[in-house]
Image (cartoon, coloured by chain):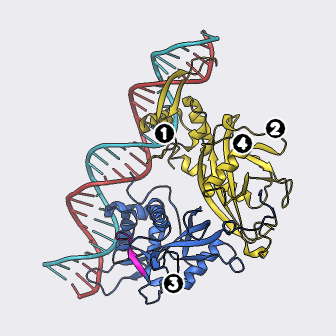
Chain colours: A blue, B yellow, C cyan, D red
Amino acid sequence: MEEIGQPLKKESVPIITVDVVVLTLDQGQLQVLLQRRPYAPFVGVWALPGGFVHMDEDQDTLAAIQRVLRDKTGASGLYVEQLATYSGGNRDPRGWSVSVAYMAILPKADLHIAQSPDIALVDTANLPDLAFDHAAILKDGLARLRGKGAYSTLPAMLLPKEFTLSELQAAYEVALGEKLDTSVFRRKVADFEFLEKTGENRSGTSKRPARLYRLKETMQTFERTLGRSF
Amino acid sequence: MEEIGQPLKKESVPIITVDVVVLTLDQGQLQVLLQRRPYAPFVGVWALPGGFVHMDEDQDTLAAIQRVLRDKTGASGLYVEQLATYSGGNRDPRGWSVSVAYMAILPKADLHIAQSPDIALVDTANLPDLAFDHAAILKDGLARLRGKGAYSTLPAMLLPKEFTLSELQAAYEVALGEKLDTSVFRRKVADFEFLEKTGENRSGTSKRPARLYRLKETMQTFERTLGRSF
DNA sequence: ATAATAGTGTCTGTCAGACAATATGAT
DNA sequence: ATCATATTGTCTGACAGACACTATTAT
């Protein structure tokens, strides 16, 4: 606030972007949506989806990230939460920048991505180098899923609206990075009362058909953990 | 300071600020540092301490908030953590704005605030109306202290470097907003092994002198809770 | 019959909360 | 003697984890 009225130097106009860690489940693996940067800086390098905030169009940064998601994946109405904000003069060669990072968790079927070698779902266990500080942002996103996932329905957002208990347990195991005991898991699921039966069964598969469930509410947190306690 | 970026259109230059929820303990009450706004907008209204990011001077928003804290309270090297980012076209009448909000937790003795009717520690139980969306930011800060305080040493940051177990329990009770059983609290404190005796006693007071303790590390989280479990 | 799914039961250990009891030590 | 501080112990209930066991049902 000291430099009132001074002419603007290049550094005095901040770059404001939003970036998003899009997580989903495919083939039993936790995957993240990445795209190759089409422009400098870091042209051709993998990066999190993101973009500039359009101040004339976006009501706030949440609206901006929803626009980005709509444009890049065709998906809207997704579960999105803010992660953190990354800033400074060194993270983007173009100048002083601020990136408000979000995390989106969704079933793979909701993702309609262009058939292109420049956008892809990548296994989080086998990540390429990422542009800017996106590796740190992604790490924070995975930590959030792991931490909050233990006492919330966040991992269930990785699944389609209807799912079996086995699929739900697998989603928690992948999100939390640990195997769970089936009987303990099911006892807790029953106790916490966050599911309702659809009445349908999963047909076509092999032996006994699994009942289908859906979440009563989109996101819910618990006072105890669905994962391993400690 | 309204007319930053003369040659550009008002809407095309975002306002980037940092704001901080400074919490401390006084007279057994949780207090927050507020200041009356000296300029428009919201002139004269209480607000969280904050300021513009100086891109030529601040390495990032954390550095910016540390500068603000140094300028307004004389304190440095404090425990500070990022809360969340608040943005949009409607929160500041001057235009589209982004505020990266932080929380600082410190002992009252570390605060050296100017003797002035325009800056004060205010009891969080009895808050005035606040400028912008600062009421929401403060609410989020208090929620963070309450939530994270249960399984971390965050409430201990409200105290001077050396403190008694009774003072520590009182800090947790204020931070978490609930009474705790002394024997349970002390058993957990012993189990978690995050304190060390200074060897000194609190002298001068009334009856039996209390032993003084200090934290082994500045901030530490636990796998179980020091507060009430659920 | 098979095998994936679903659900029950039991045992053990850990922890939390409540509360009683006692010791300590300056004033 | 008082009284805040400090410490130990006991009891109960809740829950977690491990694992055995039974039931269901399409193929």
Neighbour tally class for label 1: few under 14, some 14-19, many 20 plus, Cα within 10 Å? few
Q: Are marks 1 and 4 on the same chain?
A: yes
**Residue A125 inside the magenta-drawn segment:** yes
Magenta stretch in the rendered image: A120-127
Subunit of label 1: B
What amino acid is labelled 3 in the image? Answer: Thr
Which label belongs to residue A73?
Answer: 3
Kindly state the secondary structure of the residue where label 2 is placed: loop
Q: Spatial distance from mark 3 to mark 2, Cα to Cα?
A: 55 Å
Q: Are marks 3 and 4 on the same chain?
A: no
Q: Nearer the viewer, mark 3 or mark 4?
A: 4
Residue under pointer 2:
B115
Subunit of label 2: B
Residue under pointer 4:
B73
**Contact check, label 1 and label 4, Cβ < 8 Å:** no
Up-down: is B8 above or below B200?
Answer: below
Neighbour tally class for label 2: few under 14, some 14-19, many 20 plus, Cα within 10 Å? few
Kindly state the secondary structure of the residue where label 1 is placed: loop
Query: Where is residue B216 drawn, in percent x and y?
Result: 47, 36
What amino acid is labelled 4 in the image? Answer: Thr
Residue under pointer 1:
B217
Query: In front here: B186 or B202?
Result: B202
Q: Are marks 3 and 1 on the same chain?
A: no
**Contact check, label 3 and label 1, Cβ < 8 Å:** no
Please tell me which residue is depicted at 78% across the width and 64% down the height of the picture: A6
